[in-house]
Amino acid sequence: MAGLRHELLRWYDQAARDLPWRRTRDPYAIWVSEVMLQQTRVETVIPYYERFLKRFPTPATLAAADEDAVLSHWSGLGYYRRARLLHAGVREVVERYGGRVPESAEDRRALPGVGRYTAGAIGSIAFDKPEPVVDGNVTRVLARLFGIDTPVGTAATTQRLWDEAARLVPGERPGALNQALMELGATVCTAQSPRCGACPVAADCVAHRRGVVDALPVARARKAPGAIALVAVVATSGKGRHRSVWLVRSEARLFGGLWGVPMVQRNGCGGDARAALREAGISARLAPEPAARVEHVLTHRRLRLEVFRATAARAEESDTRRCFTDAALEEVGVSTLTRRLLAAASPSRYTA
DNA sequence: TAGACGTGGCC
DNA sequence: TGGCCAAGTCT
């Protein structure tokens, strides 16, 4: 175990990528990075992280911001509930802990949006505490290293992985050790085409010895996303540079808290676009035919959309219904799907 | 426990 | 191209 730690740390010291969040020990900045990195690639996160920290450099600035401002800085990153939970978590830190991220593992873990992984990442990286982390990378590395061939996601396998991670982390530089495991999984012990020749612990690796690296970890089968047919309406007011678009905001689980074009599930008949407008409380003259068809694939759903244009009369705005100029759109949270729909309805005006 | 929850890149 | 994957959390 000591030899393994030593090899991992030695390798990490010479192979670690220079990433923005590795240039700080600020627990808040580490927290932001860890939330952004959930299920999201490093290269994707970097520009978001830079912008977010520039706009919200401290817990106090984030806590004081309104949700639209927070979501606008998350726009395009996906899994938007992360942003709302981070916002809530940081507000709690400001209110209950004077703006300092709690060093107590228990208190940290109790914050909204902070699960077992994120709590351990902040604890080890920012506070140098010997707290384990198990993410997708660590799962792959440990499954191969120890030859764990039970399916990932079961209670027993999860327990085994956290146990192994917890055995590994005590000692010098627990934060570096955890990051070494993750870095190894991200750059060497990869899901596709692992580079065992470059691995610092190949000699200790059960899967390598047995020639089953490609077979581990054993993933659970996942279902292909089911398709859903929808109708979306891009309703605009005004002309030329003064033109603006009507968006609604919902608390639905999907895209909750974001602004988007009125949309309803299609039932086959013709009047669906009108239903979308009615539901949104917008009166508008609807184009007879869809302007475009858009397919948007999520992890669990395949969305097939018909996009209609409509011309709206100036109408009442509310908390959940507003008319946005291009500039105003940049101040709120908007999904990539919404950007695509706007671009599809008006290719010259919006870019996806 | 299994499913919801975004997006983009890769082969 | 369609499926898989990427520093998870919540319900």
Image (tube, coloured by chain):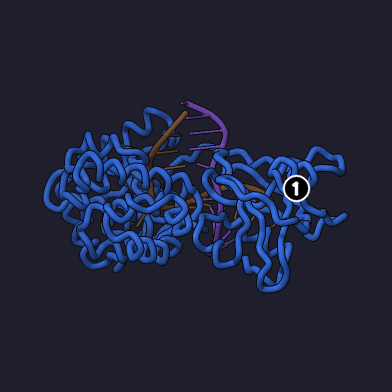
Chain colours: A blue, B purple, C brown
Residue A53 is situated, as x and y percent measured from the top left of the image, at 33, 62
State the image quarter where residue A200 is shown.
bottom left
Q: What SS does tag 1 mark? A: strand
Residue at 26% of width from left, 62% of height from top? A22
* Parent chain of label 1: A
Question: Who is closer to the viewer here, A196 or A225?
Answer: A225
State the image quarter where residue A135 is shown.
top left
Q: From the viewer's perspective, is A186 left or right of A286?
A: left
- Quadrant location of the C terminus of chain A? bottom right
State the image quarter where residue A187 is shown.
bottom left
Question: Who is closer to the viewer here, A9 or A299?
Answer: A299
Question: Who is closer to the viewer here, A204 or A110?
Answer: A110
Is residue A41 visible to us here? yes
Residue A19 is situated, as x and y percent measured from the top left of the image, at 31, 66
Of all residues, the one furthest to the left in this rendering is: A172
- Quadrant location of the N terminus of chain A? top left
Number of numbered tags placed on the structure image: 1
Q: Which residue is mark 1?
A: A231
Residue A245 is situated, as x and y percent measured from the top left of the image, at 66, 59
Q: From the viewer's perspective, is A58 left or right of A190?
A: left
Q: From the viewer's perspective, is A256 left or right of A62?
A: right
- From this view, report whether residue A115 is shown above or below residue A156: below
Residue A260 is situated, as x and y percent measured from the top left of the image, at 62, 51
Q: From the viewer's perspective, is A346 left or right of A60?
A: right
- From this view, report whether residue A259 is shown above or below residue A350: above
Looking at the rendered structure, the kind of residue marked 1 is: Val
Residue at 22% of width from left, 62% of height from top? A24
Circle 1 Cα neighbour tier, 10 Å, few/some/many (<14 / 14–19 / ≥20): many
Residue at 20% of width from left, 42% of height from top? A97
Residue at 87% of width from left, 55% of height from top? A288
Is residue A4 visible to us here? no
- From this view, report whether residue A65 is shown above or below residue A229: below
